[in-house]
Amino acid sequence: MRFAQGKAVFSREFTAETGLGPFFNNASCALCHEDPVVGGAGAFGEDDVDTERHATAGEQPTCDELEATGGPVFRQQTTGPALPAIPALAEVRVGIRSTPGLFGFGLIEAIPDSDILANQGRAGGRAAKLPNGTLGRFGRKATDSDLLTFIRGAFDKEQGVVVPSELSPADLARTVDFVRFLAPPPVLGVDRYGEEMFQAAGCATCHVPTFKTRSSIEALDRKIVYIYSDLLLHDMGAALADLCKGVATRAEFRTEPLIGLRNRTRFLHDGRALSIESAIVQHGGQGAAAATAFLNLSQTDRLALLQYLRRL
């Protein structure tokens, strides 16, 4: 019942009279998270508003998220007032973000911190230890530790809808439950050859295939989640670097979960890659070794790895 109620809030189209704006990216969560179903990723098209503009200034440890001037998410629509411009300062960096799918996020939330911390150091990965002592795991820069914080921030930053003045805490909680219980895509049949190539190229060092959950909620407890991420921050090199955010540097990104990869049509944090192969070879920094290993595979082995990834 709460899942259905939360889906209704997630799909609610706000207006200026019901709290939208004054600056926003879209009028409802579902208008961006729609592919292949409600709760999925954003689609790419000519009139697409499913990509966001983010901007921050400087670098860690003194990252400026430009909140005083409208940042770090610079919205692209308005209910009337002029949209804030991204400050034209030399140290300001702009980044584009594609809309992620939310499938399996409740299981990701239920992964024990200790299991994430256990993988620190592999390929240089580090945990996103937030100022409040929690462990970041949601967001491209691992800025949020739990779904309540993540979704409250999305209402505010994406729609200009503020809790509790424009959205009740009860409706926020229902929306959290909708996202929490969105099922991950079903696991397809085992592809041993492709899996071996995934391991051989070193992809699994950062894209850790599975974790086991721990939760007080029975439906989320002791489940194997096929996440394909260590949920750690990795330096991905200068070519992919854009902006600092949270505790992450410009070049650091949380390892992208590959759960539901088969439903995506664009890849990397900003959708710049038009194919999985392109996304792999653009890995730099701490991901460069796996990209090189992929290119060094035989053509047959590379095709097997790509086919494996297209089934996730």
Image: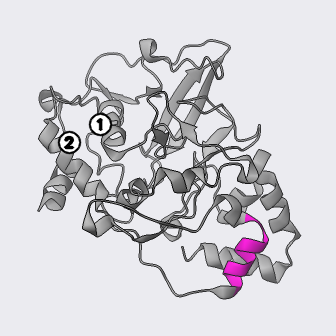
Which residue is found at the position 62% from the left and 72% from the top? 309
Compare marks 2 and 1 and give the one earlier in the sequence.
1
Quadrant of the rendered image containing residue 82: top left
Amino acid type of the residue that numbered disc 1 sits on in the rendered structure? Arg
Estimate the x, y position of residue 197 in percent, counting from the top left: 74, 77
Secondary structure mainly formed by the magenta segment: helix
Secondary structure under tag 1 reads helix
Amino acid type of the residue that numbered disc 2 sits on in the rendered structure? Leu
Q: In the depicted view, which residue is nearer to us: 165 or 266?
A: 165
Estimate the x, y position of residue 187 in percent, counting from the top left: 47, 79
Which residue is found at the position 68% from the left and 81% from the top? 194
The correct choice, above or below, for 6 with respect to 95 in the image is below
Q: Residues within 10 Å of mark 2 (few under 14, many from 20)?
A: many
Estimate the x, y position of residue 268 in percent, counting from the top left: 61, 51
Secondary structure under tag 2 reads helix
Report whether 85 appears left or right of 215. Answer: right
- Mark number for residue 172? 2
Q: Residues within 10 Å of mark 1 (few under 14, many from 20)?
A: many
Q: Which residues are magenta?
A: 193-202
Q: Is residue 201 magenta?
A: yes
State how many labels appear.
2
- The reply to whether dot 2 and dot 1 touch (C-beta < 8 Å) is yes
Q: In the depicted view, which residue is nearer to us: 105 or 311?
A: 105
Is residue 262 in view? Answer: yes
Q: Which quadrant does the N terminus fall into? A: bottom left
Estimate the x, y position of residue 291 in percent, counting from the top left: 79, 59
